[in-house]
Image (cartoon, helix red, strand yellow):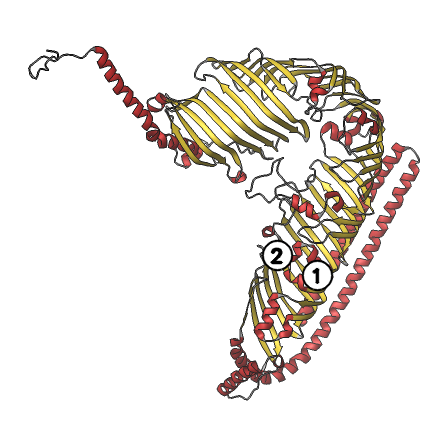
Amino acid sequence: MFFKKKTTDPNAPKVKKPLWKRILKWSGITFLLLFVFVLIAPFLFRDKIFALIKEQINNNLHGKFECEDYSLTLISTFPNFTMELKKVSLTGEKEFEGVKLIDAETIIVSVDLYSVLWGDQIDIREVGLKNTDLNVIVLENGKANYDIAKSDSTKVAEGVDTSETKFALKVRSYYLENTNITYDDRAGDMYARIVNLNHHGEGDFTQDEFDFKTTTTADTLDFIYGGVPYMKNTKVDSKFDFAMDMKNSKYTFMPDDYVKLNELELGFDGFVAMPSSDIDMDINFATVKTEFKNIYSLVPAIYTADYNSIKFGGKAEVKGKLSGVYSEKSMPGFNVDLLVENGSFQYPGLPKSATGIYVKGNVNSKGDPSMDDIVVDIPTLKSNLGGNQLEAFLHLAHPMTDPAIKAGLKANFNLATLKDVVPVSSGTVLTGLIDSDVQIDGRMSSIDKGEYEKFKAEGSIVAKELVYNDTSMGYPTNIKIMDFRFNPQYLELASFDATVDKTQLLANGKIDNYLAYFLKGETLKGTFNVSSPELDFGSLMGSSEETVAAQPAPAADPVPATATSESYVFEVPKNIDFVLSSNFGKVRYPNYAGKPEIVLDNVGGNIIMREGVMSLDKLHLNTLEGSVMMNGVYDSRNPLEPLVDFDFDISNMDIKKASETFNTIEKLAPIASKCTGKFSTKMKFNTHLNNKMEPLYNTMNGNGTLSTKSIYIEGFAPLNKLAEKLKISKLSKQNIQDVNLNYTFKDGRVFVDPYDIKVNNYKTTIAGSTGFDQTLDYKMDMAIPRSEFGAAANETLNGLMAKANAKAGTTIEVGDIVNVRATITGTVTDPKIETDLKSQTQDLKNEIKEQVKEKVEEKIEEVKEDVKAKASAEAEKIMKDAEAKAAQIRAEAKKAADKVREESKTAGEKLVAEAGNNPLKKAAAEKTAQKMNKEAEDKAQKLEKEADEKAQKVLDEARAQADKLK
């Protein structure tokens, strides 16, 4: 009654469920399937997508791609796949082996699901890099580490399919988060470093016309060009939006585009078009704000935490225009104006201010491809720094062909008063006077032609009693006098007298082509005399312990050095050609690893620094009780591994002190630390250096000779072991006389040619090698008297002799001398000694044969010796006559050569004297005299060379005749 009975009749008509229930049911099923797909899709497609990424990278790029981990998700980013790559790097090869172009903590790629499954384009919705280092390097030969795309020919060689594919990528958005970028362009002499860059860009690049929007910030930007730091720790903020016309390749700035460098904000408008290989542009920029404080914020020392507390005044404006076509045959014209009017600043708490800052400048070009129409015009530049006046002007035209310059500088500074205008740190001392008044006016062609009267260059820059010290230095720098004087021919350093801590430096000289260097970029040439009573590098650099502690461990990866690399390599400037005549009474240099400081006395000679290479010419010095003469070069053109190539002539140096002082000697000859005595050596060697200026021993090659009159050796482990092995204790302590040996180092070892010495009066021949890793490989052949051996050893030798006599039918006894060969291997501290006493049996047999043979040959030798003596006497007479004749030829040639030199010198001095006090005539006469002396020297050397060749020929012919008689 209350419940309707459920029918069980199979033929009864089915009752349809309501539509809403059916929709709900199938929607639920669909959603469930979709949810399951979303759950399992990352696992289904994870490896497929990552394999696709690796395949595309390896097929198209040179280098090593690495990724520690990766993940794929769909749920949180549906309907997009999001792949996250962890610890991603792309490392270069060949020249850039070990250099990471990209080193990213995280790379995130979000891809449209539909495009992955069914599309012919991979639709990348967003790409992001987080916590990334980008390292771009361009070598001096123009090779760049970002040029990693494989050519079609390379792909074919590697079996990669190069046929056209429908696969394509389209990106809608990208970002860089916390990215550091280093750009080191050595070919263009340009360096940039950006720290903590955050950048975002978005736009639909599949459309013909769209808006491309970007924002950028960076904590710091450093930019160096041509060695000049244009930006240092500059904060960056920019917004650039472009109206993109892809069909016409035209990109137009949108309203409110700007870049902000510290507080200087520049607004931009205009366009850039690239319809072909030419680039057409019309760009305008100008300061958004015209306060002096904004442009002054670019000074690194000014833009600090207390910048906003400085009181600024005055106006400043920067504006410019870049218009025209850039191509192989044309350049866009440009015009840039800088104007500062009545600028001033005053720091809080300081009594004086900087006032009257005026700058008016313009740089312009109409677009001459040669860039010779560039004009730099700065008619006004002046300031008053608390009573310290500065005025300057500059006009430069035709910079590429015949620079015309008109410039002036007038300044009068009392440095002690600058602390009233600009704050200095506590403990800083700055005093002294600087006066300058320089005028330059003329064209470079006048200098090139020697028409110095047509070029005005006069004045001086003089610094007196200049003292600087601060807490970070720990010692004062005192420039008593520094006097530069200008004239058209050269810039003269008339006087320089400075004391840095305990070191006094004295110098004078001149720079010959300072104008050509400034105007045409030529190599700067000069000659200087430099001297010091005592040059103490230790006081300038800190103690050796401090120096060592400050040095970083060598880099594990062979990464090419960049401008930020930690390195102690001294790089010789490539744009100078200086000849320094040096004379130092004493030079002190700190040493490493607890070794005593290096003290050099009476250092003198010529030091030539030319285009990245420093040459030492007849540099002489005394140290460690001996004297050193050296010639050679230090080549820093490759600062990663500088090269040295030196000749040394060392005489009577204390061998133990040398080992204690120089780590290289300890490596080359570990026995030296156990020796007492003096040595002399003539050595030629070359090697590369590491970033601490230490030799890379595996690259060292060279040879030399070494001699000692007397040395005493005690405590050397290999000799101690040898003494123990032979049961002859006196071998562990040795007096060795008259050592003369030849050595060669290559392949990481020092090879010693066989040489004869007496070890405790034992005739000994030694040969072998020592590795720079302190491994040993030597043979010692020793002739030891039987009396030195113990009773057991002598009984063994007598038994061997008895057996040999019985077999040969002789009655010969063992001689008084026993030949022993010792093989020394292992290392310096753990040597291995083997003695070949078993070979004595064969030696005894050979001795019996030799004694029988000697009896037969004895009479023959008596006749031979008589004939040989007569022939030798005749040969000696021939050689003495030839040597006398050769000496006469050389003496006559030297006399003639000296006469040529003296006549030239006399004629030159006469020319200079006739020039009187006229500076131009005197300069011309000196130049002519120098030329005459050079020509005379060449002629004299030719006479001496020809005579030497003639004398040598006489000797060679005599030697050949004498050899026939022997």
Tell me which numbered mark, 2 or 1, is placed earlier along the sequence: 1
Q: Is residue 790 visible?
A: yes
Q: What secondary structure is found at the residue carrying circle 2?
A: strand
State the count of labels. Answer: 2
Residue 386, how many percent across, how many down? 82, 22
Of marks 2 and 1, the one in the foreground:
1
- The answer to which image quadrant residue 596 occupies is bottom right
Q: What secondary structure is found at the residue carrying circle 1?
A: helix
Residue at x 62%, y 58% (from the top left corner): 744
Residue 264, how many percent across, how many down? 66, 18
Using residue 700 as the reference point, say whether residue 168 is left or right of it: left
In the picture, which quadrant includes the C terminus? bottom right
- The answer to which image quadrant residue 240 occupies is top right
Residue at x 47%, y 17% (from the top left corner): 203
Q: Is residue 461 visible?
A: no
Task: Decide: few, some or many residues near mark 1? Use Cα within 10 Å; few <14, some 14-19, many ≥20.
Answer: many
- The answer to which image quadrant residue 654 occupies is bottom right
The residue labelled by disc 2 is 745
865 w.r.t. 946: above or below: below
Amino acid marked by disc 1: Lys
- Depth check: 624 or 440 in front? 624
Residue 216, how many percent across, how many down? 56, 21
- Depth check: 599 or 751 in front? 599
Residue 344, how many percent across, how many down? 77, 17
In the picture, the disc for residue 637 is none
In the picture, the disc for residue 656 is 1
Using residue 766 as the reference point, say whether residue 49 is left or right of it: left
- Depth check: 882 or 504 in front? 504
In the rendered structure, are the residues bearing label 2 and label 1 in contact, judged by CB atoms less than 8 Å apart? Answer: no
In the picture, which quadrant includes the N terminus? top left
Amino acid marked by disc 2: Phe
Task: Decide: few, some or many residues near mark 2? Use Cα within 10 Å; few <14, some 14-19, many ≥20.
Answer: many
